[in-house]
Image (spheres, coloured by chain):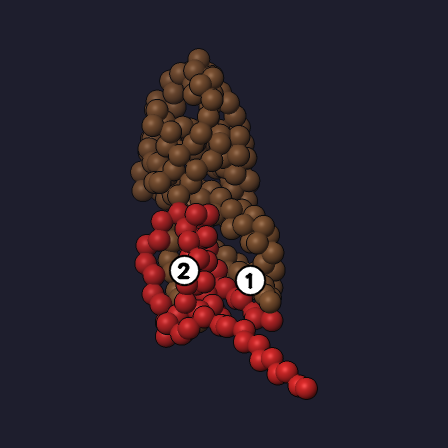
Amino acid sequence: MSAVCILTPVVVAAWPAFSAMVAAAATSLGYSVVAEGVDRINQNLQEKEVSKHRQIQLEIANSELVTGQLGRDQRICVTRGGVTVTFSRDARGRAKICVTGSRQTDEALRAFGEELSQRVVQQYVYQRVMDELRAHQFTVVEEEVEGDQSIRLKVRRWEN
Amino acid sequence: MAQREFDITIGPGGEVKLHIHGIKGKSCLEVVKLFEKVVGQVKSQQQTSEFYEPEEEVRFRIDQRQ
């Protein structure tokens, strides 16, 4: 072994790619997509409807979502068992997460939001790493998902 | 031919742990830089003794017979 290195992820993605990652990660955790690209009017109506619900705001650290000027209000909304998680892009370009539910405690809502946002970041990193490995002709010889949901890859390349 | 091998662990929150095997010296740092570009910021890095070994060289010996 030559080196051991730990890297903290930075998410830089265009909105369409990010929303596709959210949809994939949410589906893998049993959520279903209820709305995507909702405009400002519908958003206000939804906020009035959920005003009686508990609400937790989170954000994905080290994230930058790139979008066109027309896409400022882009958002994707997923739901599971009475919990609704909305991913959107804030004014600074960061990924913002709003978790709402009526029967859950704030701690439970925070845990749901963190579980889903972590899965989104993990899937983003996995896709980036796999694309780069393919580009550099590495072969994935082992791939396993561990008990704590870590993804372990063993990659190899022969060089002259 | 030399074998280049990595173990990559992508944690539940996207944190990446990279074990690099069989790459010595500067070549090892190039791999770390590549992952830094792809994943994000290096949080910690630890070199093992193999890192400080000289990089592999290929030597040719040419004998001229008359």
Q: Is residue B43 left or right of residue A155?
A: left
Q: Are marks 1 and 2 on the same chain?
A: no
Bin the neighbour count of mark 1 within 10 Å (Cα to Cα): few under 14, some 14-19, many 20 and up. some
Residue named by callout 2 = B29
Residue at 40% from the left image edge and 28% from the top image edge: A89
Residue reaching furthest to the bottom: B66
Residue at 51% from the left image edge and 42% from the top image edge: A25
SS category of the residue bearing label 2: helix
For chain B, give the colour: red
Q: Nearer the viewer, residue B3 or A6?
A: B3
Q: Amino acid at mark 1?
A: Val
Subunit under mark 1: A
Residue reaching furthest to the top: A41
Task: Give coordinates of residue A158: x percent, y percent.
Answer: 60, 66
Task: Give coordinates of residue B56: x percent, y percent.
Answer: 49, 72
Q: Does A95 appear above or below B7?
A: above
Q: Is residue B45 left or right of residue A79?
A: left
